[in-house]
Structures are given as structure tokens and as C-alpha cells.
Image (spheres, rainbow, N blue to C red):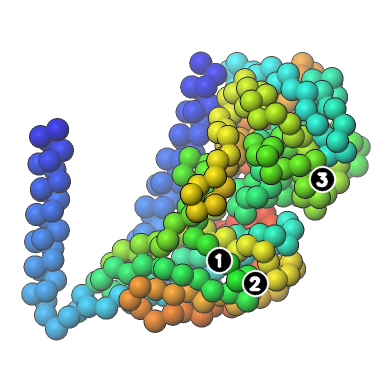
Amino acid sequence: MRTTATRRAVAAALVAVAAAALTACGGDDGDDGGDDSAAARVDGGQEKGGAVLDRPFEKPDLTLTDTEGKEYDLVDETKGRTTLVYFGYTNCPDVCPLTMSNIAVAKSKLDKAEQRKLDVVFVTSDPKRDTPKRLGKWLRMHDPSFVGLTGDFDTIQAGARSVGVHIEPSYEKKNGDVVSTHGAQVLAFSAKDDKAHVLYTEQNATAQILAKELPTLLKGGTP
Amino acid sequence: MTRARVCALALAGALAVGGCGSSDSGSDSGGAPELKASGAYVPRPVMDDMAGGFLVVENEGGTADRLTRVTSDLSDTVELHETVDRQMRQVTSFPIPADGELALSRGGKHLMFLDLARRPAEGDKVSVELHFEKSDPIKLSVPVKATNYTPPK
């Protein structure tokens, strides 16, 4: 059930992208100006905010290593706090930095008191390459308060699976390329019951949407 | 299975007919690909080890082409990547269909610059040259945008 709900949300997002891509093909106008070009239309559906889950997810029971090299128990450390969790990796030029940057920008729009109430946890889907040091360096570029976790892949994968996030182990191709997966969604856990009631897909985890909805999430509400 | 084959044949037939039509219309009007690149940007990289790049190549010609190689002053290694099931894969070229376009956009196909010469700042320009199978190369001066930039609708 859980997975289905997630999949459906992701599928819907994909359909939206596909539709946008199709429309884009017709687009023949935007010549110069560039910014107005076909690709621009791909981010359709931006008005849609986080999806509210019928069945909230429990916080994954993950004890991993933080960017200081210390043990970090996700359930304990973020108990009673509004927490955004994302599974991604740093050797990723597109979606992972986009997602974390969107969260950082949205967080910076909150007032200081709100900012202090929010935890952002980035769990690597590529622990082989994402050492605590590398994770720390990468996350500090987004926001020094972000928590980065790494550790045993199987543990991370099981934790991700428990919240409907599917990741595969990184593998090296014959040509030396390393292939890694990132999660498709950001999970928002409520401070009230420590459960994720809301998820954001790649398509709607934008800075604007997050900035608009975070204050509600911080009050324990859903968008 | 038979149906799939019939479909394929029908499709091939349609293509063949289409092909005849265009060659009829004479003097190589469907001849060379006519490429135009637009909307290029590089989101500001988080560190100096990699950056992504996005753009659209439109083809107004009646012949397909391929983006085969990209060179840049930002990096000696620029790869072509596509994202399938949230996994990046390197490919050797991207197709640019006749009367169509190749769109490199967020969450999909992108350029990947490795081992950057520098970490560019927002507002900087990166020079990028696109090389194609058939067409002449296209040179671009690509703006560096915010890390979370996505083009407006």
C-alpha cells in the first residue's frame, strides 16, 4: 500500500513531465532569450505542493555515522522535531544538489525561530564514495546545519525502503563509471508524532513550494 | 507477438511513405539537419569536482543528427549522461530527431563536467562547444545560474 501510494505520486509526476516534454516538442518560438525555451516548460505542475500520505511512514530506524564520524541515531536525534529526510549522493550533478539547494533556499526564507525547529537529514545512497568528510564538505556548501549520514549500504537501503524510497547499490561499469541511485522524494516528518505525513517528489520539491509549506509543517500541520 | 510485428511493419511502412514524400518534394529540402541551441545553463556546482549542464538543441532540418561530443573551458572531461530510474548513465551520443529537438533538462539528460578547472560563481559564463555527427559545431557562452535554478515556465 505504502509503496503504491508513493509510486503513484511519482508516476503522476513522471506523466506530467512526459506531457510537458511532448508540448515542448511543438515549441518552435523561443529562439533567443533561451530561458523561455522548450525545456522551461518541463517544470509544469509546480503549483502542486507536497502530497499528504493516507498512511504516514514511521521514521526509519537508522543508526549511521554523521559527518563528524560520530554515531547518529535518527529516531533519537530528531525526536519531536520537524525533519526533512532525503536519500541522495554527492557525485550527482543534477537532482541531488538541486533538491538540497531547494531545501536550503526554502529554509533561509523562514524566520530564525522556525529555522531552529527544522532538521534536515541527507542520507547517502552511495556510502562507498560518500565518506563522512566528503558528505560534510558537500553539505556545508548548502547549509552548515544539514546533517549528513553514511554507513552500511544494506542498512541504508532497508531504512529507505521502509519509507517507500527505492535505492540500488552503486556499481562500477566496465569503463570505470560508477552508477548510483538517488531517492525520488523528500519526506517530511512531523514534530507531533515523528511520522512522515507529507512527501515531495523531484517535481514539486521546489524552493517556492517548500518555503510556502514549511511553516505549516513546522506547526505540525499538513499542506 | 504477431500484433507487435504488424505494428512494427505498419510503422516502417509509414516511415517509408514519409520518406518517399519528402524526397518527392525535391531538391534535398529534407537534406541537412538545421540545428539551433538555446536555453543553456550550468547550475552553480556545489564543489569543484563536478557540474551539470542543460540546454535544448532544435533541429529544423529534415534529417536527424547526433550530439556526439562536448568541449568546454570548465573541464577537459564533459560527459553525456541520461538519468533512467534515478540512475545516471553515460552515453556516447544523444539523438537529435529531424524536425524535433534534443532537450537536456532537470531530472533527465544532462551534460556532466568533471574535475572542474574552477568553481564558477553565479553569473559567470562558461564556454561550451557542441560537436555533432553531421552538423558544424556550435559554440555557446553558457551562464552559470543558482544551484537550484530551473528555467521559468
Respond whether the residues carrying marks 1 and 2 are from the same subunit: yes
Respond whether the residues carrying marks 3 and 2 are from the same subunit: no
Query: In this rendering, would B45 be left or right of A146?
Result: left
Q: In the structure shown, which secondary structural element does the residue marked by tag 3 occupy?
A: helix
Q: In the structure shown, which secondary structural element does the residue marked by tag 2 occupy?
A: loop
The percent coordinates of residue A38 (x first, y second) are: 45, 62
To which quarter of the image does residue A29 belong?
bottom left
Indicate the quadrant containing the N terminus of chain B: top left, top right, bottom left or bottom right.
top left
Vertical order, A61 against A82 (above or below): above
The percent coordinates of residue A71 (x first, y second) are: 85, 27
Q: Residues within 10 Å of mark 1 (few under 14, many from 20)?
A: many
Hey, what amino acid is under mark 2?
Leu
| Residue, far front | A174
Query: Which residue is identified by label 1?
Result: B78
Of all chains, the one bearing label 3 is A
Q: Nearer the viewer, residue A124 or B96?
A: A124
Q: Is residue A30 visible?
A: no
Respond whether the residues carrying marks 3 and 1 are from the same subunit: no
Compute the Cα span from label 3 to label 2.
Answer: 25 Å
Hey, what amino acid is under mark 1?
Val
Query: Which residue is identified by label 3?
Result: A133
Vertical order, A60 against A21 (above or below): above
Q: Which dot marks residue B74? A: 2
Hey, what amino acid is under mark 3?
Lys
To which quarter of the image does residue A214 belong?
top right
Q: Nearer the viewer, mark 3 or mark 2?
A: 3
Tags 1 and 2 in contact by the CB under 8 Å rule? Answer: yes
Q: Residues within 10 Å of mark 3 (few under 14, many from 20)?
A: some
Q: In the structure shown, which secondary structural element does the residue marked by tag 1 occupy?
A: strand
Compute the Cα span from label 1 to label 2.
Answer: 9 Å
The percent coordinates of residue B31 (x first, y second) are: 22, 78
Compute the Cα span from label 3 to label 1.
Answer: 26 Å
